[in-house]
Image: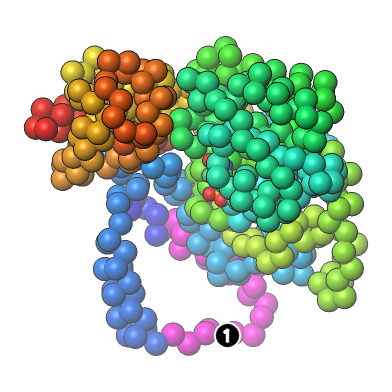
Amino acid sequence: MIHPAELKLLREALATLAEGFEDLPAFTPEIDTGAVHAVLQRVAERMQDNYPYFHPQYAGQMLKPPHAVARIAYAMALWVNPNNHALDGGRASSALEKECIVELARMYGWENSLGHLTGGGTMANLEALWVAGLTNPGKRIIASEQAHYTHSRLSSVLNLPFSSVAVDAHGRMELVAIEDLLRNGDVGTIVATIGNTGFGSVDPLPGILELAEKYGARVHADAAYGGYFGLSSQIHASTRAAYDCLTRVDSIVVDPHKHGLQPYGCGCILFRDPDVGRFYKHDSPFTYFSSAELHLGEISLECSRPGASAVALWATQQLFPLVTDGQFSQWLDQCLLAARTLWDRLDTSVYYRPLMPPELDIVVYAVDAPDMAEASRRARQVFALAAAQNLHLAMVELPSALVSTYVPEMAVNTDTVTCLRSVLMKPEHRDWLDEIARILETAGASL
Ligand SMILES: *Cc1c(COP(=O)(O)O)cnc(C)c1O
């Protein structure tokens, strides 16, 4: 779980950090090491009660361990504990955040955009929809019925009407359904999900942009999970077409804490038009008095934010630049290939019925059974049997109609079917597929 060199690397980084403050009078905060030791032992024991998210045999929910460089940089920064709300609170980490944002925006071909890090995808989407509502006041937000549930909730927070859009058998928004809503004339913003959380399906962005232009709507891309896959050489042509036109949308959300190797607390919102900065204007009497330079708090809804997030992301992007021919993009390739391989394995198994072939790195599969109630029961059994062998999966409740598309001979006797879901977002998953498939077969055989 811990690489032997990690704590040494942290100590070395902290030593260099401390050199920057050597001219101060000596000061060492007091720690009651005995009491701290005792409580740390207790809390470490409490923390044992977790799924092993860091291990390749965790093949369930959308959880990816931060890279060591991110964890160490974050920990190092905690000794300063910078606040990226304002330059007074985090001068260096604000500069690092701006550099990170430039690199993230370049991934979408944007050279002069506005953006910043956020606590996560939810806050980032809130800002996107807030700006959408200010640009098209009172107008409707529409998003896929497979979009993250945050969009309907955030629309309610913002007091904007919301409608969801039907998806096809691949889990992508239907263009005809979008146009039906657009014809009503009250749609202000289309949310395109670039990699939805359930299936990893990518909404048909080229067609969405065409419709948005025709009807004068904004387009917001929620790429919280899928935002990095444009760097991969392994995505299929239709998926590539969606990534290629991300440069034309009005705003993009990408979560470095999803696929970007970061600890939680790192989302990002980017606006193509930097002029939206005018919506954030406020007069704070107390925050900004050290410099005429841009304070991130001037372009962010959140006030205090961990500067450590920016420090960790900057270090990660230095080591693994956001380019198409580097280590980071190769890792994304591995995830896509792992998902495709698992889908193939399940497809040849007598126990499982995989649903749509994965567009990114999420595989959703039913357990074969004569009817849907039994398939749901077996899915819960496989979940438990696999867990007993240290293979951790996730379950997902899907509409029977969708499952029927892929398993037409399974009798429909329930509205929904419990299926299994594996997000193969660790690059190591590919090397562990034999073991993952072996445990799945054993579990299937013992039903
Ligand atoms: C995870 C996710 C969100 C929510 O982001 P958080 O970082 O969990 O707040 C929104 N949209 C999509 C597509 C996501 O995958």
Q: Is residue 15 magenta?
A: yes
At horizontal 37% and vertical 24% (from top left) the residue drawn is 403
**Quarter where residue 119 is shown:** bottom right
Label 1: few (<14), some or many (≥20) within 10 Å?
few
Residue identified by numbered label 1: 27
User: Looking at the image, is 186 positioned above or below residue 306?
Assistant: above
User: Looking at the image, is 135 positioned above or below residue 79?
Assistant: above
| Amino acid type at mark 1 | Phe
Q: From the top left corner, tell me how far across and down residue 362 is, in percent.
A: 42, 30
Closer-to-camera residue (17/133): 133
Q: Relative to residue 163, is residue 200 drawn left or right?
A: left
Part of the protein shown in magenta: 8-31
At horizontal 62% and vertical 40% (from top left) the residue drawn is 254
**Quarter where residue 373 is shown:** top left
Q: From the top left corner, tell me how far across and down residue 294 is, in percent.
A: 84, 57
Q: How is the image coloured?
A: rainbow
Residue 104 in view = no
User: Looking at the image, is 229 positioned above or below residue 56?
Assistant: above
